[in-house]
Image: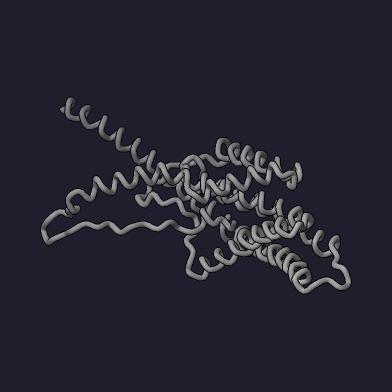
C-alpha cells in the first residue's frame, strides 16, 4: 500500500559455508542441492501465494457485486497498460552489474515496518471488517461507501506483488504502482468521507451499538484519508520515487560502463595476435 511489497527488503538467508585457513570455502554436503530444490519450489509457489489468491477472490467478488463504480473498475486496466508502456518505451529495465541481485528499492527500519503494519490495519483489515460488518447488519450504505477503496487497494497489492518478482520492470515503474493507486484512492476516500459524514444520519433515539457503528465508519474514513495522504506526500513522492530513479540511473550508468569496458577488452584482444604476427 505504501509500496509494501516493493519497499520492504525481502529476508535473505545467510550463506552457510565452512571455511578453514588456507582452504577454499566448502558447503555442507547435500545442502546446495537441497537449497536449489527449495528455491525452485519457492519460485513456483511464490506466484500463487495464499494472500494473492485471496486478493484475486476479493477483486472478483467486488467486481461482481455492482458496488464499484465503472471508473474504478477500469482504472486498474488503464494503470496496467500505462505501466507496461513506461517499461517498454520510457524506463526499460537494465541488467544490474551488482552481485546482490536484490530488487528492493527502500530498505525500511523497524519504525518503517511498524508504519507499514499500521497502514495495513487502517487501509485493509479494518475496512474489510467494516464491509463485512455492513453485510451482517444490513447496512448497504456502509458497504457501498468502503468497497471501492478495498477494490483498488486489493488490485494495488496484487500488482505490487506480481511486479516485484519480475525483472521486466525497472525501479521507476515499480515505484509508480503505489503512487498511481494512492492518488486515485485518495479521491475515492474523499467520496467515502462525504458519504459517511454528510449523507448518513442516525435516528434521535438510536441504540448505543448503532451510534458506535456510525462513529466507527466516520473515524475509519478520516483515518484512511490521513494515513494515505501522509503516505503520498511524505513518503512516496519525496523519498520513495527519487530513490527509485536514483537506482535506475545508477544501474544504467553501470551497464553502459560495463559495455564500454567489454568493447575495449575485445579490441585489445584482437590487437594482440596482430602485434605478434608483425613481430
User: What quarter of the picture does the N terminus occupy?
Assistant: bottom right
Q: Residue furthest top?
A: 277
Task: Decide which of 90, 14 is in the foreground and name it.
Answer: 14
**Residue situated furthest left in the rendering:** 22
Which residue is drawn at the image coordinates 63% and 64% (left, top)? Answer: 122
Q: Quadrant of residue 23?
A: bottom left
Labels in figure, total: 0
Q: Position of residue 8 (x, y in %)?
A: 49, 59
**Image position, residue 228 (x, y; %):** 66, 61
* Residue situated in front as seen by the camera: 126 or 174: 126
Horizontal side of residue 212 vs 76, given as left or right: right
Is residue 186 shown above or below 169?
A: below
Q: Which residue is more in the foreground, 115 or 234?
A: 115
Q: Is residue 125 left or right of residue 193?
A: left
Viewer-proximal residue among 79 and 257: 79
- Locate the C terminus and report the quarter of the image it occupies: top left
* Image position of 101 with respect to 274: above or below: below
- Asked whether residue 252 is in view, the answer is no
Identify the colour scheme used.
one colour
- Is residue 22 in view from this perspective? yes
Say which residue appears at 43% left-offset and 56% top-offset.
Answer: 10
Task: Give the image location of residue 150, x and y in percent.
Answer: 66, 53
Q: Quadrant of residue 232?
A: bottom right
- Give residue 265's position: percent from left, percent from top: 30, 37
Q: Is residue 195 left or right of residue 64?
A: right
Q: Residue at x 44, y 46 (%)?
A: 46
Amino acid at each position: 500500500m505504501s509500496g509494501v511489497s516493493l519497499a520492504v527488503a525481502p529476508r535473505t538467508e545467510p550463506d552457510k559455508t565452512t571455511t578453514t585457513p588456507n582452504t577454499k570455502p566448502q558447503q555442507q554436503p547435500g545442502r546446495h542441492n537441497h537449497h536449489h530444490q527449495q528455491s525452485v519450489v519457492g519460485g513456483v509457489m511464490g506466484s500463487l501465494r495464499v494472500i494473492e489468491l485471496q486478493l484475486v477472490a476479493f477483486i472478483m467478488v467486488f467486481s461482481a457485486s455492482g458496488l464499484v463504480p465503472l471508473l474504478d473498475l477500469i482504472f486498474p486496466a488503464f494503470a496496467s497498460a500505462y505501466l507496461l508502456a513506461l517499461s517498454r518505451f520510457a524506463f526499460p529495465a537494465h541488467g544490474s552489474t551488482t552481485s546482490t541481485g536484490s530488487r528492493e528499492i527502500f530498505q525500511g527500519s523497524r519504525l518503517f515496518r511498524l508504519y507499514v503494519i499500521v497502514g495495513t490495519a487502517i487501509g485493509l483489515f479494518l475496512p474489510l471488517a467494516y464491509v463485512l460488518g455492513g453485510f451482517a447488519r444490513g447496512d448497504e450504505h456502509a458497504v457501498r461507501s468502503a468497497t471501492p477503496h478495498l477494490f483498488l487497494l486489493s488490485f494495488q497489492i496484487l500488482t505490487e506483488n506480481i511486479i516485484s518478482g519480475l525483472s521486466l520492470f525497472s525501479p521507476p515503474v515499480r515505484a509508480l504502482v503505489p503512487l498511481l493507486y494512492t492518488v486515485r484512492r485518495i479521491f475515492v476516500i474523499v467520496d467515502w468521507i462525504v458519504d459517511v459524514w454528510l449523507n448518513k444520519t442516525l435516528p434521535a433515539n438510536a441504540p448505543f451499538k448503532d451510534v458506535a457503528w456510525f462513529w466507527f465508519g466516520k473515524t475509519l474514513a478520516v483515518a484512511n484519508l490521513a494515513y494515505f495522504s501522509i503516505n503520498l506526500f511524505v513518503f512516496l513522492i519525496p523519498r520513495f520515487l527519487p530513490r527509485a530513479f536514483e537506482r535506475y540511473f545508477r544501474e544504467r550508468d553501470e551497464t553502459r560502463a560495463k559495455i564500454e569496458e567489454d568493447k575495449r577488452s575485445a579490441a585489445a584482444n584482437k590487437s594482440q595476435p596482430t602485434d605478434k604476427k608483425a613481430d
